Image: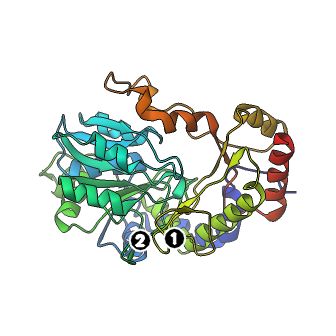
Amino acid sequence: MRKLQMVDLKGQYTHIKSEIDQAVIDVVDSTAYINGPAVQSFQANLEQYLDVKHVIPCANGTDALQIAMMGLGLKPGDEVITADFTFAATVEVIALLGLTPVLVDVDPETYNIDISAIEKAITPKTKAIVPVHLFGHVANMDAIMDLAKAHDLKVIEDNAQAIGADYTFKNGTSKKAGTIGDVGATSFFPSKNLGCYGDGGAIFTNNDELAHIIRGIVNHGMYERYHHDVVGVNSRLDSIQAAILDIKLKHLDTYNSRRQDAARAYTKALQKHEAIITPTTFTHKSCDINCSICDTCDCHVFHQYTIRITNGKRDHLAEHLKEKNIPFGIYYPIPLHLQKAYADKRYNEEDFTVTNQLVDEVISLPMHTELDTEQIEYITNTILEFLG
């Protein structure tokens, strides 16, 4: 059996080595390292793939979120609602801009932001909602957009983990994750479903005016050289990373399909154990309830395959996996409302019952495009043998 890895970037690279190597050489030969033709090509191809009017590349996913909020003109003191159970970057940028983070609990089935918790948290100071499409699973955007419309709120999609996922609305139409709200932000960190070989990010919007503002912000506030019309930052996707991403974008649907196949194999092996809760997906195609992973599932692209261990043995299982040379991740071990940087006396523990349970139960298994049947069988058999 091949060595198990949480993410097998080397294995993925070997399949596209000639394409990647030539793309990098072409950029070096051109010496157009910043905002060169490779960036323009990737931007145009990603716009076409997402069916969105504007893609604005930037330096990383955290910048993408920050710049999106800057572009919307949010002001210090404005409240922004987001999920407690996610990576810190989501709340980090809210705090950096002097906005007021409002953390709420998540849904026990999908781990995405809880709709009733959003509604409860809305005040006259609330200006925006940031749904996180956690682990590659699109949040309930029907309900989120309805709430936003009812309360005149902006929606900023944190799409760092779900690029390529589709969301089907109750009316039967569908859109790509990240293109539903006012603006979306994504990361191209190497381990993402669409990852470069360094840092990178992008912002998506169908709003022409907002896109214009954001294009200035990412480039020192300039629309004309040395004319600084807005307060900006230096956040650009370099041409080498763009060239790599342009190659990998051609393979993204295949990559996501492989992840979904691996997820189905994991679920088939693990779902009947009484101490294991496997992922569910949420779809409006045929029902308004959570369901198991189906052959036509497209709302979850499995950036992570995350299970819950409900018998109190999650940490013991983690130690056992380590002994068996099986990598794993615990995302996330400490909820944001208990992090020193984001603690706030406004928060009550009884408002975070799901998050507080998840941090004790979740464990993510190896998930990437190169997983094979032998590896998945070894991982699942090891888990089942340990749990009994």
Q: Residues within 10 Å of mark 1 (few under 14, many from 20)?
A: many
For residue 249, the mark is 1
The earlier-in-sequence mark between 1 and 2 is: 2
Return the residue nearer the eye: 24 or 320: 320
Image quadrant holding the C terminus, namely top right
- Residue pictured at 48% horizontal, 56% vertical: 188
Indicate the secondary structure of the residue bearing disc 1: helix
Residue 137 in the image, given as x and y percentages of width and height = 51, 58
Indicate the secondary structure of the residue bearing disc 2: helix
Residue 368 sits in which quadrant?
bottom right
- Residue pictured at 19% horizontal, 62% vertical: 212
Residue 251 in the image, given as x and y percentages of width and height = 58, 73
Residue 205 sits in which quadrant?
bottom left
User: Is residue 60 something one can see in this rendering?
Assistant: no
Q: What's the residue type where badge 2 is placed?
A: Leu
Q: What's the residue type where badge 1 is placed?
A: Leu
Q: How is the image coloured?
A: rainbow
Residue 281 sits in which quadrant?
bottom right
Residues under numbered marks 1 and 2 in contact, where contact means CB atoms less than 8 Å apart: yes
- Residue pictured at 20% horizontal, 57% vertical: 150
Q: Is residue 336 above or below residue 107?
A: above
Return the residue nearer the eye: 279 or 88: 279
Residue 252 in the image, given as x and y percentages of width and height = 55, 70
Q: Does residue 209 appear left or right of residue 324 in this picture? A: left
- Tell me how many marks there are: 2
Q: Residues within 10 Å of mark 2 (few under 14, many from 20)?
A: many
For residue 342, the mark is none
Residue 293 in the image, given as x and y percentages of width and height = 62, 65
- Residue pictured at 17% horizontal, 39% vertical: 125
For residue 46, the mark is 2
Q: Does residue 125 appear left or right of residue 205 in this picture? A: left
User: Is residue 18 something one can see in this rendering?
Assistant: yes
